Amino acid sequence: MTAPAPWRAWAEVLAAPVAVLLLRAGLQAQADHDASGLQPLRAATLVADPYQALWAAARPFVLTALGLLVAGLLLRWGLRAVLRRHGWPRVRPWVLALWGLAWLLGGAGLLASHLNQAGRQPVAEQDARVLLARAVPANARSPGGTELYLELPGAPGPQRLLAEDQPPGAWPPGRVARLHVETGRWWGRWARLAPTAGR
């Protein structure tokens, strides 16, 4: 079997990642024009000591790294076995197909997340009791503010919400915050402090 030209080989490898990155850039540009001020309303974990806080912060990274390591080892072992049996020319189309499929699924996930947020629907405003407030420094994607840990009626546990441009001292534990809440088209909740918050 004749080896493909170098430019064609590179095109086959890079076409899918470039397409997904362009899609991500386009969706991000649309998200940057969102003036609703809504922030994700997520489940929070309250910890009792610094060691629990360290593990809570590092857990997503550790679990992701372990998952990628296991997947990489299994892929390497399986690919070596297949290459020994069939050779690279016969395996190559399948590898490229799986590579493209992986990026296609990634692009579909980005698009689904965008459509989910674009289809948000408001629900009744809710009163939440502040459990804890901590300062969040500004960065390239956020002006910073205060991360509020909240107790919401009907929620299975504490929730956390970023209140942009709000000082932590304005939200002592026990204070009531009025939230404007919206639900995603398929999953998730977003919220912002309502104008009458902090009565």
Image (tube, rainbow, N blue to C red):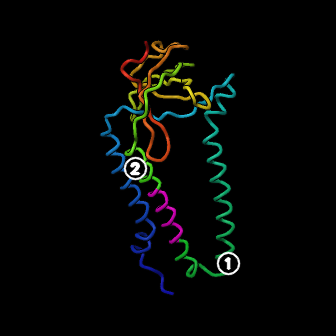
Give the residue type at disc 2. Leu
Other-residue count near label 1 (Cα within 10 Å), few / some / many at <14 / 14–19 / ≥20? few
- Find disc 1 in the rendering and name its residue: 84
Above or below 114: residue 129: above
Above or below 54: residue 17: below
Say which mark, if any, is on residue 112.
none
- Front residue (pair 47, 36): 36
- Residue at point 62%, 47% (across, down): 64
**Secondary structure category for the residue under label 2:** helix
Above or below 42: residue 104: below
- Residue at point 43%, 14% (across, down): 198
Above or below 93: residue 110: above
> Hey, which residue is sitting farthest front in the picture?
124
Q: Quadrant for residue 164, please give it.
A: top left
Give the residue type at disc 1. Arg
- Residue at point 62%, 36% (across, down): 58
Magenta portion: prevailing SS class: helix
Is 24 covered by the magenta stretch?
no
Q: Quadrant for residue 149, please give it.
A: top right
Say which mark, if any, is on residue 115.
2
Residue 184 in percent (x, y) is at: 44, 42
Mark 2 touches mark 1? (CB < 8 Å)? no
Q: Nearer the viewer, mark 2 or mark 1?
A: 2
Residue 163 in percent (x, y) is at: 43, 25
Q: Is residue 111 left or right of residue 93?
A: left
- Front residue (pair 53, 109): 109
Is 106 covered by the magenta stretch?
yes
- The quarter of the rendered structure image containing the C terminus is top left
